Each structure stands twice: as structure tokens, then as C-alpha cells.
Image: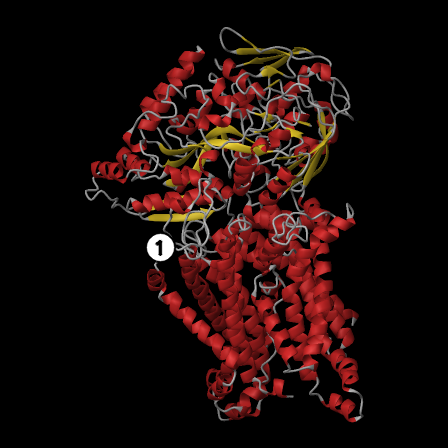
């Protein structure tokens, strides 16, 4: 489960769904906009060798596979570590065995997962030894250590026997009968879902003997995170140098055996510069050599690429964006007021704050194109509600709903509401458009523009703060399934006092029940249909104002054969090569 | 700290107590000398005009035919959401939301002047009071106040300002809601950072004034401390206070702009010159108008205040240039 | 003298303690984001956040937290770890120091090389056209905010976006040890922009001091002795008038070493100021605390050096 940060820049990225409709995922031209046409799939005859330069504005947050969770971090972590399963760059729907030797075996009662791991995978120096199943067991166990501070371990691995009380020590439900087998015993039928989460970096092996001899996990933050060059790597690359907030470099892992891996690892080295000015870096990448972007390029650069250098820019769909309306508090506890707010929203203006049509399609519901259930929820046209009919907003419809809510004049006449917005662009601009839309409707708004961290850790993720509107939130699911898209964000049971991501605090018994039914579906088609139906219900209940299905732009120098990892909407360093 | 330079901030030790004392009615003399300084007068005229424009901003915008400062217009953006430059409809072009830069610059003058005047006013009142207390009573009062000033002057003030401003931008603000987010916070931060400089200067002045014969005389006649300060010391500080105020106003305009530039000043959608320049930094190579116009307004305003301050200095201290 | 210095050093330590305590109070009691959540990650369960709160000692009284923090700083010179990227704060400051040092050093050289001659010449040609022009220009330079001047200079002269592409633009900084040529090129614009208002300020300061000094009796005596005016000014006048300039110079260097936030931000130079700014943007308390303390140290230290040097130079200063 993941939340979207400033732009997709620091986004907690994750697995993007492209399940059933691969065509929609394959190219960005689906949006009918002036997109890019850089070839970003692996091609035949890619050249080996050379060094790639990556530039990003933001720095890395956590490079420890135990706590890594952001898009930027994933770009590096998946090149230096091997989780049990991972995604080939062109196929974000179907995980492939990585450290694992074959697909996971899920027991009939949905309570046991058995995974065979590959032999012949060795750690980088100085550890050097071969990876065993015990290393995977330890990796997941340390996810529960507060010094490692993994955020998702309880959500996806909390059902393992003994995990509920785990604080970093051994977990009885993870067993290793031999060096190449690992068995997870669960307390409830959750095995199929948990198997999906084995694509997360927490399942990458960590050598216990090494961690303990160096006492890396004994303080907060773990030494594995504060100095990532000390890690024991299993991927094709190692983190050779790291200066937090400044730079990072990758070199080849001398102990990596290509015969055990599907990654081609063409590049000899990667040097990554952090703190780049997005405008300057973008220009350097487009006009220079051997370079790609690490996080979202600046809007002027995207415009430049989309108009003048189409063969150097590509767009990858990723996640959704919306404005949350607090359904627990007046006035948005009234569905008619919510519908009015949606109807009054100029979604074209919202889209323009992010760069216009190239930034993504205007959303009409929550599941994004390519997500299982997208078509069933209404496709690009949406479920057909009148309050979402006009992308420019429709004040007549808004007035109609406000009258239904008891505001006879068709303008909102209640007390002031509180709205929180990000102070960094482009989210800051979206907040101001939202502010204007609400004011047009007669709302008096107490608006606070604060830093992104403040928006979330102080306000929007904390229900007790009683924020009525969060101006720009978004969601990227952890794995390609309706559950990962909609359960955390719109299920009443998912509301929590801190780090809450059901920002609208939407808790509708009918929707909750529909989610339970959808989750129980095992056939992909039926499951997609059921989740599509859930999305339709959420949209019709006006739980939030959907405004965009993102397209993430990526740019490369002319001499780079860039390969985009579609699940992460960023360059795959293990597949990209120089021309 | 002098924000304009990112460097140290020293108020010139320009005020010769003798010079102030020579003139029995310093203010009229002041004015007579200032009137001869054409540049300073022109600058003063500019400031007055700016004040009028700021106060009558809605009218000015209407007369020019520009849309109000917060009116967004997607029509003025291209298909990528990039703003368009100066045209008949938008004299100074528009920003990324299609808002009219001309009317935002005009309304920005309000913020700049309001913040600068109010924060300077507070700083001058507090600084004068503290400085007089320290210089007049000396002893432990002086020790405590001087140490307090030392501490404040030891801070990297811009960092402290950003920190306070971002902390006070939360909820109901700082000090139990007294310091509200937005302009109030900015004013508070600037006043807090500025008063020690004034207090230090005033303290020095008072230390020298209190040894004068006429103070001795007043004391021997049985005047109370309060009366001596109000009747004999304060009047002699009026001229220097005016000069220092004029010198601090432009610094504080720049301070507000710097805080807004760093993203902790006014709350959107309110327009401020610094915030506009900050907003323009990501697109200034293509949307030059968004950077240039607020910047020019800022420089001209600060320059005008500096010119007047210069003129006042000369008027107060005629000896300096006549050597 | 030794006792004077000892006392000043002791006061400096007290000042730093107070500054650190006040910073702690402001940033920890009025944090703009929840530190435990930041450290735990935005996705962590409330239970994990609570565990981390306990681990970091954030549930303890603020004075205990301050005591523990200062203990680490004093005993181990350890400033803690960033909430944002887990890296040690001390390491990050050390990493950023060369850029800030480079920026400061070059700017100081330029502003002295420009400001001092202009100040002296203006004083010598008082009220002539060249003096008026120089003083007018200096007033403009003082009135222009450094970040705006920076943007304008980039718009005009940056090699990537400039109308007259001459110098490397924003984000081109390379460490001196990597490539001295690129280091020099990348810093030309930042140096000029940062130095502009300083040069103007110093020119005005020196001119004013010089004019004042020239009215002193000993200058009149020197003149009466028939010494050439130029010699009177340079040998006697400047020597006396330069002392206040040196004082201000010390303080300015102290402040700049703590990070020129605005200049570093506009030119995207990875210095201390940029680090502090980013930390505040991300509510990264340990880094904020570290950089504020670091900046305060240089300010206080510069004050100390200036006072001590002043005491050496000017025997009239009492050590009381």
C-alpha cells in the first residue's frame, strides 16, 4: 500500500497494475495526446558496458531492503538485491521468480506458502557465501525490528504464526526445512495475498551472521540503512559509494552469476547525482550523453521533450490522484454536498497544473486504466454520474445538488471548512485550483499550505485533526489487484489514527461488504468485475474528487537505450544500456 | 543578519549625539536639509505613490482593466499548462494558474509595505524600550538585556525565521493562537530578528546621553527616572529613530521577500513579490515576465527607501559630507 | 589578555548552549511534522510508530531529550541521524562544507578586490561624477535581493539557458578535488552575484569611514607637513578607516560559513545552506538542529575572533 508524494517525485512507488489489458499498458498513446515515442522495452542486441549517469532532485529515503519503499529507492534496490519474486520491465502484471526457483506453492487451505530458492546465488564481498533460505527468513523477521522500521511487514506478513508479537527475533511460522526451502505458516487464509507481497524488497535475503557480527541492527536507524555500502548484495550491482543527499554509485557485483538471473545487467557502472535542479538536469539529459532521469522531470522539460524530442521521452501510466472530502464531518458527510463539490471542480484546470493532457487522462473514477476492473468500472468514460460528466465542471449540476442538501440559493451557506495543501509544485497549484473551485461554490475555506511531510504526518493522515479537504492525494497500489487499489483508501476498516490513507474516511457498509465479496473471488475475470463494481459504488457515493490518472514522463539522452520498469514507472537499471 | 546580502547587519553608527543636540528642533531642521536633496525627494515621492497604489490596489487594477489577482484562467495557458507572456489582456503576462501578473504585482505591494511597516514599527518600539532600559538603568538590567540580544544575534536568523514561520503555520499558530499563520507570523519573525539591532544602537546613545549635563541638571531638580527618560532622553532619540526606521524598512521588505521566496511567507493565494519570484524559479527561462516584474518592483521599492534613508542620514549629520 | 580570551570563550560556549536549547525547543516542541512518523515511514502501522517514538525517546520530557542530545554532541560529536534518509548528520555536514567554503572564499576575494578600491577612490573624488555614479550603483546593488540577481544572471549568462551563454549555470558545481577547472567555472556566477551587494556595502562603508577619518587632527597634521594627498590618504587615512571594515568582514565570513541559503538555493550548490533548507522543507529535525548549531558556531566564533583581534589592534579596548 502506498501513498503518493510530491509529484511522483518522492512517491512511495509500487506495483502498478496492468493486468488484463496489456495493450493499454504497452504504450502511452492511449491518452490521445502528444506523447513520447522513445522505445522503452528491452530490444535485441543491446550493448554491454559503459557507465550511465542518473540525475534526480530528491534523495533516497531508505536503501535498506528491509525498509525501502519509495519509487526512487526501488530503482536502486531492485538492481542490487534479489527478492524472491520480481517483475520483468515490460510486464508489471506477472511476477517472475527471482531468488526463488519457481512459483510459490499455496496450500489448498490458503494457509501455507512454500517457496523453493535458487542455489548458486552468492553475496557480494566481504560476505561471499551462498544464500540460504534462512537468510530470507531472517530478512522478513528483521522487518519487524523497530530499528529497521518496515512499514508494510504487519500488513502483509502479520498473518504468519508468531508474527503478531515479533520485534525482530525469530518467527515460529517461518520455517526452513533445508537450505533451499522456506515455508510460511499462517494463522488465517491469506496465503495467496501474502504470496503476492513476496515481490516486495523485504523478501531479499539478509545474512544474519554478518548483521550480528557488525551489530548493524542494534540501533535506530539500522547501520544497514544509514550506510548502505555496508550491505551484502545479491543483485548484479553493489552500492559502491554513497553520500546521503548528494550521490550514489553502483558497480558490478563480482559474485553475481548471470546464469542464476534473468537480468542482463548491460551497464558496467551507474553514477547517480542527487539534488539536481529538475530544469537544469532535464536539459542536460536531453542534450547530453549517457544520462537518464531518476525522478519526475520538470514541466518545462516534459513540454520540451513532448514537442521537440519525442524520441527521448516516454510516458508510463501510474496510479491516480484525487481530492479527499472528509465524509465523517459536516458538510461533506452529506453525499449531495460532496456531489456538488465534484461537479464544481474544473478537472481540466487540475490537469493543467500537472502539464495538461501529457500528464495523464482526466479521471472519472478511481481505478486507473490498466487496473483490473477499470473497464468494468466504466472505462475512460466512467460510471456516468452527472456530477462527473463535464470535465470543466458544471455549476448548474453543483447548484442542483446543493439545493438538495438544503442550501436553497444553490450556493453553500454553511460554516467555514478547513483545507490542507502541499506548498510545493505541482501539488501547490492543484490546491489553489481546488480552493478556487470551492470558493466558486460559496465555501469559505480556511486554507493551510504546508510542506508535504506536514500535510501528511500532521494533518491528512491523522483523522483527529478534522481536516475536511486534502487538496491533492494519490495512490499507487502495491500489487496489481483491486484490493491493493481500493481497500486501504476507501474501506472503513482501514481507517487508523495515524498514517491513515483512507483520507476521505469513507466508511459505507454496502461498499465494505462489496469489498469483502470481491476479495473472496478467485477467478481473475470475476475478481476484476467485482472490484470494478466496488469502484463504481465508491464513485457514485462521491467519496472523493478523482481528477487524474497519471502518466509518468521519463527522459533519456540520445545514446541511451532506456528500459522502463513499468511496475515502477522508472528506468530499470538492470536492463537499460548505452547505444 | 542583513538579508539582502546574506551577511552581517550593522546599522551605521551615524548618529553623532552632538549633532542631534545642536539642533533644538531637529525635525524642522531635518526637513529643511532634506528638501535640498532632490534624489531623496524623488524617492520619497515614489514611496508615497507606491503607498497610494497599494491602498487603492482594487481601483488601480480596475482602471488598467486587469482581472483581479486571484482570478485563474486556463485560457491564458497553453496545452501544457505553461503561462503566456505580456499581451493586451495581461500587461505583465500570467502565472502558471493563468492569474494576471500585473494585478498580483500591484497587490503584492500591499504585502510588502504592510509587513515592512508593521514589523519595523514593532521592532523600533521594542528595541527603543529595551535599549533605553539597558542604557539608562545599566547594572543587571543591562546585563540581562544585552545577553538576550547576544543570543538572538547568535542565531542564523534566516534559518530561525524559516523554522518559526513553518512551525507557526500550523493549526492556530504559535503562542496560543496569538501568532496566526500567514502575515502575522511573518511580521512576528521579522520583528523578533530586528529589534536587537535597534536596541543595541539606542543603548549606546542613551549611555552617552545620560552622562550629559542637562540630564544631571534635571536629576538635581528632582525629576524621576521616568520623567527624565520621557522628557529629556526620548526627544533626543527621535531623529536617530527616524533615520534607523528608514534604514530598516527596506531590509525588512527584503526579509519578507526572502521568507516568501523560501516558501514560508504569506499563505496562498495571497500575492507577495518574494513568493512570485520563488514561483517563477522553476520556469524563469521561458516565463521571464513572471520573474522580472515582481523583482523590478521589489528592487525599485527597496532602492527608494534606501535613497530616502541616505538623504535622511545626510540631513541629520551634515558634517559628515562637508569635511 | 589570556583571561579576557578565556572569558570570551566561556561565554561563547554558553551562547551555543542557549542557541541549541532554543532551537531544540522551537523545532522539537513545535515540529512541523511528526518525527516518529517521519522515521517510521508514512506507511507504518500506528503500533510501529509508537515503538519508534519510544525508541527515539520522543515520549520523554523535552529536557531529557535535550540532555541526551547534548550528551551525544559533546561526548561523541554525534549529531544523530537524519529522519529523511537515515544518514549521520555530522557526515552530511562535512560532505557539504567544501561547497560552502568554496563559495564564501571566492566571494570574499571578489568583494574585497572590488569594494575596497571603489570605496577609497570614491572618498578621494568625493562629490565628483565618478563618486556619485559609484555610490548610486552600489545602492542599487544593495537593494537587489541576491536570489533575484542570481536568477537574472542565470537568465542572461548561464551556458544552458542564458541569452548570452558564457558561464556554467545552476547545478554545475563540481568539487575542487574532482576537477579544478569546472569548479572554477561553476562558481563564477555565484561568486559574482553573492559578492555584488557585499562589494557595494564595503565600498560605502569604507568611503564613509575614510571621510570621517580625513577630518581627524592627525590627518590635518600630515597634510600640513606637506605630504602628497594620495600618501596622506593611503598611509594614514585608510589604515585607520579599515578597522571597522575588518570587523564586519569577520562577521560576514562567519555568517556565510553557516551557509548562504539563498545563493546556494538559486545556483543549486550543495552546501550547508542548501542542506539546512532541504531539512526544513522535509521537517528533518536532527539535520535542522545540526545545521543551526553549526551556523551559530561560526557566527559566535567570528564574533570572538573579531573581538580578540580588535583587542590586539586597539590598545584602548579594555579587557574588563
Q: Which residue is mark 1?
A: B67
Relative side of A266 to C43, left or right: right
**A560 or A404: which is nearer to us?**
A560
A500 lies above or below B128: above
Q: Secondary structure at mark 1?
A: loop
In the picture, measured across the screen, residue B286 lies left or right of residue C309, that is left
- In the figure, is residue A504 to the left or right of B223? left
C268 to the left or right of B263: right
Chain ID of residue with mark 1 = B
Task: Tell me if I can see residue A67 in this picture.
Answer: no
* Way the structure is coloured: secondary structure
Q: Exactly how many numbered labels are in the figure?
A: 1
Image x and y of residue A485, in percent:
45, 25
Give the percent coordinates (x, y) of residue A82.
65, 21
Vertical position of residue C61 compared to residue A256: above or below: below
For residue C120, what is the image quadrant? bottom right
The spot of residue A321 in percent (x, y) is 44, 33
Q: Quadrant of residue B100?
A: bottom left
- Please tell me in which quadrant of the rendered image residue A353 appears: top left
Amino acid at each position: 500500500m502506498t501513498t503518493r508524494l510530491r509529484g511522483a517525485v518522492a512517491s512511495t512507488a509500487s506495483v502498478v497494475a496492468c493486468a488484463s489489458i496489456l495493450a493499454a499498458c504497452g504504450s502511452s498513446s492511449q491518452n490521445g495526446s502528444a506523447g513520447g515515442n522513445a522505445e522503452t522495452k528491452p530490444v535485441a542486441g543491446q550493448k554491454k558496458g559503459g557507465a550511465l549517469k542518473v540525475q534526480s532532485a530528491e534523495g533516497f529515503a531508505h536503501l535498506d531492503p528491509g525498509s525501502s519503499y519509495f519509487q526512487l529507492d526501488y530503482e536502486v534496490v531492485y538492481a542490487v538485491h534479489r527478492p524472491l519474486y520480481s517483475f520483468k520491465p515490460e510486464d508489471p502484471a506477472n511476477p517472475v521468480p527471482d531468488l526463488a526457483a519457481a512459483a510459490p506453492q499455496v496450500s489448498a487451505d490458503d494457509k501455507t506458502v512454500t517457496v523453493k530458492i535458487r542455489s548458486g546465488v552468492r553475496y557480494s564481498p566481504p560476505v561471499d557465501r551462498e544464500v540460504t533460505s534462512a537468510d530470507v527468513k531472517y530478512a522478513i523477521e528483521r522487518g519487524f525490528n523497530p530499528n529497521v522500521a518496515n512499514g508494510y511487514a504487519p500488513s502483509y506478513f502479520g498473518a504468519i504464526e508468531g508474527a503478531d508479537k515479533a520485534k525482530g527475533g525469530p518467527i515460529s511460522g517461518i520455517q526452513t526445512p533445508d537450505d533451499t526451502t522456506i515455508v510460511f505458516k499462517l494463522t488465517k487464509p491469506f496465503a495467496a495475498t501474502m504470496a503476492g507481497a513476496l515481490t516486495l524488497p523485504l523478501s531479499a535475503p539478509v545474512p544474519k551472521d554478518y548483521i550480528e557480527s557488525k551489530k548493524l541492527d542494534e540501533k535506530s536507524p539500522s547501520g544497514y540503512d544509514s550506510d548502505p555500502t555496508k550491505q551484502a548484495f545479491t543483485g548484479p550491482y553493489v552500492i559502491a559509494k554513497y553520500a546521503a543527499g548528494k550521490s550514489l554509485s553502483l558497480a558490478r557485483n563480482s559474485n553475481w552469476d548471470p546464469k542464476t538471473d534473468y537480468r542482463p545487467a548491460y551497464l558496467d557502472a551507474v553514477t547517480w547525482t542527487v539534488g539536481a535542479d529538475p530544469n537544469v538536469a532535464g536539459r542536460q539529459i536531453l542534450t547530453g550523453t549517457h544520462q537518464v532521469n531518476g525522478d519526475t522531470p520538470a514541466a518545462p522539460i516534459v513540454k520540451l521533450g513532448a514537442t521537440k524530442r519525442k524520441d527521448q521521452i516516454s510516458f508510463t501510466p501510474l496510479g491516480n490522484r484525487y481530492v479527499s472530502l472528509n465524509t465523517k464531518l459536516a458538510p461533506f458527510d452529506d453525499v449531495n454536498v460532496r456531489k456538488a463539490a465534484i461537479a464544481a471542480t474544473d478537472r481540466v484546470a487540475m490537469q493543467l497544473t500537472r502539464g495538461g493532457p501529457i500528464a495523464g487522462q482526466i479521471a472519472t473514477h478511481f481505478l486507473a486504466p490498466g487496473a483490473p476492473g477499470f473497464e468494468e468500472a466504466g472505462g475512460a468514460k466512467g460510471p456516468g454520474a452527472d456530477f462527473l460528466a463535464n470535465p470543466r465542471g458544471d455549476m448548474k449540476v453543483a447548484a442542483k445538488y446543493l439545493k438538495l442538501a438544503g442550501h436553497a440559493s444553490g450556493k453553500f451557506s454553511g460554516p467555514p471548512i478547513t483545507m490542507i495543501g502541499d506548498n510545493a509544485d505541482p501539488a501547490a497549484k492543484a490546491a489553489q485550483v481546488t480552493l478556487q473551485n470551492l470558493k466558486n461554490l460559496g465555501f469559505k475555506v480556511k486554507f493551510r499550505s504546508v510542506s508535504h511531510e506536514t500535510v501528511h504526518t500532521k494533518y491528512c493522515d491523522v483523522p483527529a485533526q478534522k481536516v475536511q479537504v486534502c487538496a491533492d492525494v494519490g495512490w499507487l497500489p502495491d500489487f496489481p489487484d483491486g484490493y491493493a487499489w481500493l481497500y486501504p483508501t476507501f474501506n472503513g476498516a482501514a481507517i487508523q489514527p495515524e498514517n491513515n490513507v483512507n483520507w476521505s474516511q469513507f466508511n459505507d457498509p454496502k461498499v465494505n461488504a462489496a469489498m469483502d465479496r470481491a476479495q473472496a473471488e478467485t477467478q481473475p475475470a470475476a475478481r476484476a468485475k467485482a472490484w470494478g463494481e466496488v469502484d463504481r459504488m465508491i464513485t457514485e457515493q462521491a467519496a472523493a474528487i478523482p481528477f487524474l490518472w497519471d502518466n509518468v514522463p521519463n527522459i533519456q539522452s540520445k545514446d541511451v537505450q532506456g528500459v522502463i520498469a513499468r511496475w515502477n514507472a522508472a528506468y530499470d537499471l538492470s536492463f537499460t544500456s548505452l547505444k | 543578519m542583513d538579508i539582502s546580502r546574506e551577511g552581517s547587519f550593522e546599522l551605521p553608527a551615524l548618529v553623532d549625539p552632538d549633532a542631534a543636540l545642536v539642533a533644538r528642533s531637529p525635525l524642522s531642521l531635518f526637513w529643511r536639509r532634506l528638501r535640498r536633496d532632490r534624489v531623496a525627494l524623488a524617492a520619497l515621492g515614489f514611496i508615497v505613490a507606491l503607498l497610494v497604489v497599494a491602498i487603492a490596489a482594487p481601483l488601480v487594477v480596475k482602471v488598467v482593466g486587469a482581472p483581479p489577482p486571484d482570478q485563474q484562467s486556463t485560457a491564458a495557458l497553453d496545452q501544457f499548462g505553461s503561462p503566456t507572456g505580456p499581451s493586451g489582456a495581461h500587461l505583465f503576462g500570467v502565472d502558471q494558474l493563468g492569474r494576471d501578473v500585473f494585478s498580483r504585482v500591484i497587490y503584492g505591494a500591499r504585502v510588502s509595505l504592510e509587513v515592512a511597516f508593521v514589523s519595523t514599527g514593532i521592532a523600533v518600539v521594542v528595541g527603543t524600550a529595551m535599549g533605553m532600559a539597558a542604557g539608562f538603568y545599566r547594572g543587571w538590567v543591562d546585563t540581562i538585556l544585552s545577553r538576550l540580544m547576544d543570543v538572538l544575534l547568535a542565531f542564523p536568523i534566516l534559518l530561525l525565521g524559516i523554522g518559526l514561520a513553518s512551525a507557526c503555520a500550523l493549526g492556530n499558530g504559535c503562542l496560543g493562537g496569538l501568532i496566526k499563520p500567514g502575515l502575522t507570523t511573518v511580521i512576528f519573525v521579522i520583528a523578533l530578528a530586528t529589534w536587537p539591532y535597534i536596541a543595541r544602537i539606542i543603548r549606546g546613545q542613551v549611555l552617552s546621553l545620560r552622562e550629559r549635563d542637562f540630564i544631571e541638571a534635571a536629576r538635581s531638580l528632582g525629576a524621576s527616572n521616568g520623567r527624565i527618560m520621557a522628557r529629556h532622553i526620548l526627544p533626543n532619540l527621535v531623529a536617530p529613530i527616524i533615520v534607523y526606521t528608514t534604514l530598516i524598512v527596506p531590509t525588512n521588505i527584503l526579509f519578507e521577500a526572502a521568507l516568501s521566496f523560501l516558501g514560508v511567507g504569506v499563505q496562498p493565494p495571497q500575492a507577495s513579490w518574494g513568493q512570485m519570484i520563488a514561483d517563477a524559479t522553476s520556469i524563469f527561462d521561458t516565463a521571464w515576465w513572471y520573474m522580472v516584474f515582481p523583482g523590478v518592483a521589489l528592487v525599485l521599492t527597496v532602492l527608494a527607501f534606501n535613497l530616502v534613508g541616505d538623504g535622511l542620514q545626510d540631513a541629520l549629520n551634515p558634517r559628515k559630507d562637508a569635511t | 589578555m589570556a583571561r579576557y580570551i578565556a572569558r570570551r570563550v566561556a561565554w561563547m560556549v554558553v551562547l551555543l548552549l542557549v542557541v541549541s536549547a532554543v532551537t531544540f525547543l522551537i523545532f522539537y516542541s513545535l515540529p512541523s511534522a511528526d518525527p516518529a512518523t517521519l522515521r517510521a515511514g508514512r506507511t507504518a502501522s500506528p503500533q510501529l510508530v509508537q515503538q519508534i517514538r519510544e525508541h527515539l525517546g520522543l515520549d520523554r520530557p523535552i529536557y531529557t531529550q535535550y540532555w541526551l542530545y547534548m550528551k551525544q554532541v559533546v561526548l561523541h560529536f554525534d549529531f544523530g541521524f537524519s529522519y529523511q534518509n537515515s544518514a549521520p548528520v555530522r557526515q552530511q555536514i562535512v560532505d557539504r562544507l567544501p561547497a560552502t567554503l568554496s563559495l564564501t572564499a571566492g566571494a570574499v576575494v571578489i568583494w574585497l578586490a572590488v569594494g575596497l578600491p571603489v570605496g577609497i577612490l570614491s572618498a578621494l573624488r568625493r562629490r565628483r561624477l565618478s563618486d556619485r555614479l559609484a555610490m548610486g550603483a552600489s545602492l542599487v546593488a544593495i537593494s537587489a535581493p541576491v536570489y533575484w540577481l542570481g536568477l537574472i544572471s542565470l537568465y542572461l549568462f548561464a551556458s544552458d539557458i542564458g541569452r548570452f551563454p558564457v558561464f556554467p549555470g545552476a547545478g554545475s558545481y563540481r568539487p575542487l578535488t574532482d576537477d579544478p577547472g569546472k569548479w572554477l567555472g561553476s562558481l563564477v556566477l555565484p561568486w559574482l552575484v553573492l559578492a555584488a551587494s557585499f562589494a557595494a556595502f564595503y565600498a560605502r562603508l569604507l568611503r564613509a569611514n575614510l571621510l570621517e577619518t580625513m577630518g581627524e587632527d592627525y590627518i590635518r597634521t600630515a597634510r600640513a607637513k606637506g605630504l602628497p594627498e594620495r600618501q596622506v590618504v593611503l598611509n594614514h587615512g585608510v589604515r585607520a578607516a579599515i578597522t571597522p571594515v575588518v570587523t564586519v568582514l569577520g562577521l560576514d565570513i562567519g555568517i556565510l560559513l553557516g551557509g548562504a541559503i539563498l545563493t546556494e538555493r538559486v545556483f543549486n550548490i550543495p552546501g550547508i545552506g542548501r542542506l539546512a533548507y532541504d531539512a526544513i522543507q522535509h521537517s528533518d529535525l536532527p539535520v535542522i538542529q545540526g545545521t543551526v548549531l553549526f551556523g551559530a558556531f561560526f557566527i559566535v566564533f567570528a564574533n570572538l575572533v573579531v573581538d580578540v583581534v580588535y583587542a590586539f589592534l586597539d590598545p584602548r579596548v579594555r579587557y574588563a
